[in-house]
Amino acid sequence: MELLTNVFFRLLSMSVAALPVMAVVLLARQLLRRSPRKYSYALWFVVWFRLVCPPGLLTRVRWSLFNLSPLEPVGRLAEDLNRGMPQAFVPDPGPVLGIYPGAESGSAVVVQAGLSPGEAALTAAVAETAMRIAVVVWLAGLAVLLVYGAVAYVRLRRSVAAAVWAGGEVWECDGIPTPFVLGIHRPRIYIPFGLNAHGRTYILAHERFHIRRRDHWAKLLCLLILAVYWWNPAVWLAWTLFCRDMEMRCDEAVLTELGDQAKTGYSESLLAFALDRRVPMALAFGEHDAGRRVKNVLNWKRERPRMAVLALMLVATVATVCCNNGTEQPDSWVRLESRNDQAGETSVEISYRVREPAMAWAIYEDVYQGGVRISSRPVLLDGFTDAGGVSAREGGLSLTVNPAPANGGWAELAFRANLGEGVTATYNLPLPELDFSSERVVSGLKDGERQELTERIDAELLTVLLFTEQAPDTGANTPESAAAAVQYRLVLSNTGEGSFAVMDEAQTLFDLRMDYIGDAPAAGRLLEALDVGSLGAYTMELFTSAAPYTLQVNFRDEPADIDPTSPAIDGPMTWKAEVLLALIGNLEQVNWSYPTREDGQKTLLTMYYPRSQADAHAQALGYDDIKELGQTAAGLRELLAYWNYNGMQVEAVSHTASQMYLLAQERTADTLAEDLLCWDLWGDPALDGNYEFEMETDGTARFSISEGMWNEEDRGWDETTNAVGLDVRNALILMALWPEIDAVQWRGGSWLSEVSEAGADDWLARQRAPMPSIRDYGASAETVQLLLNLLAEADGGAVPATEEYAFQNILGVDGVRWTKTDTNGFSIRTYYALGADGSRTPIAESFGWGGAEDYSVDLDGDGVEELVCNVTYGGDGARRAYVYQRRADGIYLGDLSTGGLPDFLDWGVNASWSEYDPEGRVFRLHYCVDTDGNGEAEEEYALAEYGLAEAAGALAWNRWEP
């Protein structure tokens, strides 16, 4: 039902988009009323095109009809319908706004209105049910029209079954009301017996023109479109006028061929065969308003070349503006609709639309004094229904500002927002204590023009400029041009309302940015704003005598929380270092040091964070480098929001992730592998000295683990736990941290496995990971932590991989079993016999979900074991017991035969299924039975059981080809 609902919404979308096109065609048709009907007929194909072509396949051009402002709501509605059920069909609860005034500096009043959450949920459920009913009704109407058309076609065929061939494509028949064309591939012209010579000439010329122009194909196609849109009266109107223009175009073509002298005779023929009702599924001579057609024939004149050129230009223009979509509009935007200034009060009406990924909006109030921003806070904010909030994603609001006079100046600024439906918010802002004498209110939006909104692009709604003298006429309208100013901005967030706290922090930090590292007091203020002191007592050093210019933070005390699960200094300092690199213009590196202990001895550990690492992180956010990111508060806001990505706080980065990332900056691939493999925080120290590492030229990292490891039970090392878990986890981490590694192979004992970069990316997609490529997870300690979290949730086992195990004495030979597992967990296992020269010959194959169900069984008692595999097909889930037997002339595959089973009904691949039970040493065959003898499956299965000897006789054998 969901698929049908989506199809229905697509049809609604195309139907809505076609409505203005129909209106344009009707207008153009009126302008062409004195021109030949071939032009009006051609225009209707523009309408049919819009009704069948999805909007996403159409090009966007500047001169499209849908760029006209009055049609923008139509375009938006069509886009919403194309996406599925639009927001308008799912009512929101009443608006509830979050107001953030300071208690000491203002007051706010909020009036709530609208549906309660329970009422909204009930209304949404009713709307969804109504849409399901509408889909069912649409399908029923479509079925009725298709059946009616098919029945009408069959009846018409029967009515001309006794027709007599009269030469060429012409057939004569009694009992038909009018001549017509019938058929698709080889259409025939049917005419009544006894037509006079003139009438016959007119009619055949008319019908042959239909055939030459493929009108029978055009009419069938448009009839099918009408059936799909049977519920739309505008489409019925288009169909009626289309058919009328088709017939008149054909009439005019006949007159062009036969001349003016044929007008009278042709008109008489039309009147003679005029029909009160239509002939379904045919092109009938006397259909479609014979009276209008006769009038058109009698008024017909030959077309003049100049009029032909003008008509062609009009048709081409209509086709161009109607067959293309409007230019791409911003997904999210704000627009000034009107402004009203009266009695010292300024009001603006604003419309807006906000699309995903935005999840919340806020109106910020920035206060400037002497050109310097002294405060910034959100005064109005909220989220959206689909993101846990309550506001609509599009609508309008009005803002009013009124500077209040006091003692010849202004004491406060009144702000009022009206969001409609009885929702208002008011806020009074105390102003800096200056003797203001004049003011100017400036709108940051251009009247009637959309301004794009993104998380990086704010919209300046209103700016109140306050002057201590007469406002200058210089035209300068920025906060820096006045003694004081208050600016209101509309801001979006992609991560919800909570991120606005991050925005405030970003603005505070951004206001402290500096061009040069040499200003020690300014650098100290940045460290204070970053709350570095919360990590412990510290001193700061600046290295400015030579590049790279470095800021170093030296912590006095040893951290008490360095372990795999607790926060440490390294995690917080990593993101603080990136902020410092973003905000200090010539800073190239940030270091931090702290005392720690190694082997019981106290030592000083220094961490280095170069600009190159921060640049890579900034590029992942879409900036050229970390310096470009630090040029705007919005960029810094993104950086801080990213460190809180997916709810993962920076301070929650474990020491394990931090150390992994920092080791990767210092180690080569082999030493990094050793650190990971044997590190007690992550790997298994027992492996130290028990493996070999090779880095191949093709980018493959190969590990060979000593065979003796498999027999040391005290180390807890076995194939099913440590081996599989270790190779998958470390393969992903190595590929994330070391870009030159494209695949990781592990060999130990009798097994071999491999994880490739493509397999890792497939696994990430299956986990719905936030970043698509395994390479993205080596960009920072935080992204490494994110990868560790993903591995912990998935336990590593879903990564697509290949594995190889040695076997002995299967089908009488020794060899290897090669297993390939895809991202869905479906495995294919191939058994190979090994030749003396190392060559491999496939001898059997099993497949299915999960682990192998393969058994060696002496089926026929000859002392040689067969290979029995319970296999499961991936597509339809069919399950079979396959038996492989090695003979002198090759490998044979046996499957339990259904021949001779009583009442077996073979209706398809799942009519029977079989399996081998290793505990009971029996084969079971389940098969569908025809219980009532009607030859139809009743989903009833019977069971046949076979012992080993019986199964040997019940198997159907075929030579197996790999």
Image: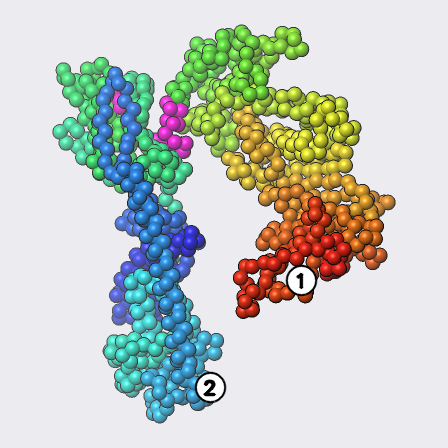
Query: Quarter of the image containing the N terminus?
Result: bottom left
Asked if residue 610 can be seen in this view, the reply is no
The percent position of residue 674, horizontal first and vertical second, equals 69, 24
Query: Quarter of the image containing the C terminus?
Result: bottom right
Q: Amino acid at mark 1?
A: Thr
For residue 856, side relative to residue 212 (left or right): right
Nearer the observer, 605 or 929 = 929
Q: Which label was assigned to residue 844?
A: none
Magenta part of the protein: which range?
483-504
Residue 446: quadrant of the picture = top left
Nearer the observer, 778 or 232 = 232
For residue 1, side relative to residue 196 (left or right): right
Was residue 552 drawn as part of the magenta stretch in this picture? no
Was residue 491 drawn as part of the magenta stretch in this picture? yes
Q: Which residue is mark 2?
A: 168
Pointer 1 with pointer 2, Cβ within 8 A: no
For residue 837, side relative to residue 727 (left or right): right
- The secondary structure type at the circle numbered 1 is loop
Q: Residue furthest right?
A: 836
Asked if residue 757 can be seen in this view, the reply is yes
| Residue in the image at 17% along x and 18% along y | 409
| Residue in the image at 35% along x and 49% along y | 128
Q: Distance from label 1 to label 2 (Cα)? A: 58 Å
The percent position of residue 449, horizontal first and vertical second, equals 29, 40
Q: Which residue is mark 1?
A: 898
Q: Amino acid at mark 2?
A: Gly
